[in-house]
């Protein structure tokens, strides 16, 4: 049971460490609003890993079948959501917010925390590849619904995946926060533009892949 829990933590790290659009947004939010904004955004994202771990361990075939059956549309919608975040970020001006939050990195209104978490969840849940990564990581670790029959063991593994993801987001936001005060306002504007462009093209790439699958079916 303990080994399964440790494996689950490693799985949570494995599926979270690759810096996709969520990682870029986490970095941007940390620099703009402080460590807890970036961490909260990451925690919102990690709830997708939590849900997909439940799907993988309980073998909820109807969820997997739905995502596979509607994979192209999920990719379209996910790509549109990600490109929207990219455009919004590229054209936003964070200077005023940065000035307000620069010396208050630990204080965020509950509404803002909820909004950041919801954005992280929306960006990750709209990516069908997240479920594929979770399933692949479980298979790599030798964990399957057949091997995980104890309800307590399953609960610990789901918790472990979430904990692994949360550890990564805490570490990333903490490291980025160390360099936060070294950013000039001009540097912050440039970071926003670059982050927005990267996220936009990642979302556009998802849409293009959806089109390719549509015409190759």
Image (cartoon, helix red, strand yellow):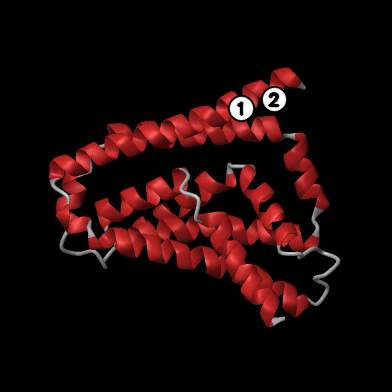
Is residue 34 among what the camera can see? Answer: yes
- Of 128 and 13, nearer the camera is 13
User: Circle 1: is it few (<14), some (14-19), or many (20+) Cα within 10 Å?
Assistant: some
SS class, disc 2: helix
Is residue 114 among what the camera can see? Answer: no
| Image location of residue 106, percent across then percent down | 26, 68
Q: On the image, which quarter does residue 41 sit in?
A: bottom left
Q: CA distance from mark 1 to mark 2?
A: 6 Å
- Of 80 and 9, nearer the camera is 9
Residue 110 against residue 193 in the figure, above or below: below
Task: Please give the name of the residue rendered at 32% of the width and 62% of the height, measured from the top-left corner.
Answer: 175
User: Circle 2: is it few (<14), some (14-19), or many (20+) Cα within 10 Å?
Assistant: few
Q: Residue furthest bottom?
A: 2
Q: Is residue 19 left or right of residue 27?
A: right
Q: Is residue 199 left or right of residue 139?
A: left
- Of 86 and 23, nearer the camera is 23
Residue 70 got which mark?
A: none
Q: Which residue is under mark 2? A: 213
Q: Are marks 1 and 2 in contact (CB under 8 Å)?
A: yes
| Image location of residue 95, percent across then percent down | 17, 44
SS class, disc 1: helix
Q: Is residue 128 left or right of residue 165?
A: right
| Image location of residue 154, percent across then percent down | 73, 72
Q: Which residue is under mark 1? A: 209
Quadrant location of the C terminus? top right
Task: Please give the name of the residue rendered at 35% of the width and 56% of the height, measured from the top-left corner.
Answer: 112
Q: Residue furthest right?
A: 146
Quadrant location of the N terminus? bottom right
Task: Please give the name of the residue rendered at 51% of the width and 45% of the height, measured from the top-left corner.
Answer: 123
| Image location of residue 122, percent across then percent down | 52, 46
Residue 107 against residue 25 in the figure, above or below: below
């Amino acid at each position: 049971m303990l080994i399964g829990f440790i494996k689950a933590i490693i799985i949570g790290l494995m599926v979270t460490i690759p810096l996709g659009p969520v990682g870029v947004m986490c970095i941007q939010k940390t620099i703009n609003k402080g460590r807890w904004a970036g961490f909260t955004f990451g925690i919102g994202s990690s709830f997708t890993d939590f849900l997909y771990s439940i799907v993988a361990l309980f073998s909820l075939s109807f969820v997997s079948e739905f995502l596979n059956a509607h994979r192209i549309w999920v990719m379209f919608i996910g790509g549109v959501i990600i490109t929207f975040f990219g455009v919004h970020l590229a054209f936003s001006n964070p200077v005023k917010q940065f000035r307000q939050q620069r010396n208050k990195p630990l204080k965020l209104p509950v509404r803002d925390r909820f909004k950041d978490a919801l954005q992280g969840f929306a960006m990750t849940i709209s990516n069908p590849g997240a479920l594929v990564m979770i399933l692949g990581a479980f298979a790599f670790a030798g964990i399957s619904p057949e091997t995980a029959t104890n309800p307590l063991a399953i609960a610990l593994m789901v918790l472990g995946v979430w904990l692994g993801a949360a550890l990564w987001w805490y570490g990333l936001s903490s490291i980025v926060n160390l360099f936060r005060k070294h950013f000039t306002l001009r540097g912050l504007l440039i970071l926003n533009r670059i982050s927005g462009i990267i996220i936009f093209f990642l979302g556009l790439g998802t849409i293009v892949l959806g089109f390719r699958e549509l015409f190759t079916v």
